[in-house]
Amino acid sequence: MPNPASLQGQAALVTGSSSGIGRACAEALAAAGADVAINYHHSAQQAREAADQISRQHGVKTVTIGADVSQEQDVERMFARTLEAFGHLDILVSNAGIQKDAPFADMTLEQWRKVIDVNLTGGFLCARAAAREFLRRGPVPERSRALGKIIFISSVHQRIPWGGHVNYAASKGGLMLLMKSIAQELAPRKIRVNAVAPGAIRTDINRDVWEDEQTAAKLCSLIPYGRMGDTLDIGPAVAWLASDAADYISGETLFIDGGMTLYPGFGTGR
């Protein structure tokens, strides 16, 4: 009997996957058998190192593609390069995202626009390109029950307000309804669209938080499970969500946050 969690013979594109959560997603997809296109914006060498390691460890094909997901021409070129490398595409993980933090009254229009452009418009452009390709290609039931799978990497801040980071929170809140609206529209065509929303995850971006004992302790007080997450908490969940084991799931957000969205301040009932 075939393993429903296998991605053997499938091809995935993961944006922003030269490091951090994106790289963990690429590694988990490859571990399940998928060939993986690794997108980067600035870190070409880091992307090549990730691709080489994934190929050696899992015996799959990889390709690295530099592209700015906020630019339509870059996105179209990235998808064309993926199809050139693998011949087909089955999975998109739209992970690329940035932060440009500032108090609201001091936030510049440039800071606002840049985060919205990458986090929200980039998600739209990539998902649209993936949907077009899935619909053009048609079903391949021997590879997957779904016509295609789109997974957005969102954040707990699609639900939790975040003062000092309003551009980021707004981008993730928008991403949530983008995901749900696409899922509603495309489900009849057998394209599954979901999101994964990480909480506090140890990556290089927030190294200053988790390497400082006091700051890390303060953050963990907001997490009922009592620890920060690791990228390995995210990747396997994304791979499962992309597989036939999750074929009946569409339009949902999987929160991976140690309970951060449970409002731990109310945990005592007082």
Image (cartoon, rainbow, N blue to C red):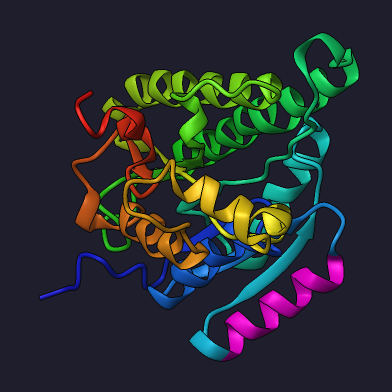
Outermost front residue: 270
Magenta-span inclusion, residue 175: no
Viewer-nearest residue: 253 or 151: 253
* Horizontal arrangement in the rendering, residue 139 relative to residue 93 (left or right): left
Outermost bottom residue: 56
* Horizontal arrangement in the rendering, residue 163 relative to residue 230 (left or right): right
Viewer-nearest residue: 32 or 169: 169
When asked about the image quadrant of residue 108, the answer is top right
Residue 132 visible somewhere in the drawing: yes
Position of the C terminus, as image quadrant, is: top left
Residue 230 point in image, percent of width and height:
49, 63
Residue 14 visible somewhere in the drawing: no
Residue 159 to residue 192: above or below: above
Residue 97 to residue 226: above or below: above
Q: Residue at x 80, y 48 (%)?
A: 67
Residue 183 point in image, percent of width and height:
36, 26
Outermost left residue: 1
Viewer-nearest residue: 102 or 142: 102
Q: Residue at x 23, y 40 (%)?
A: 249
| Image mark count | 0
Q: Residue at x 56, y 27 (%)?
A: 172
Assign the magenta stretch its main secondary structure. Answer: helix
Range of magenta residues: 44-56
Residue 12 point in image, percent of width and height:
52, 59
Residue 74 point in image, percent of width and height:
81, 41
Position of the N terminus, as image quadrant, is: bottom left
Viewer-nearest residue: 96 or 270: 270
Q: Residue at x 30, y 56 (%)?
A: 144
When asked about the image quadrant of residue 142, the answer is bottom left
Magenta-span inclusion, residue 52: yes
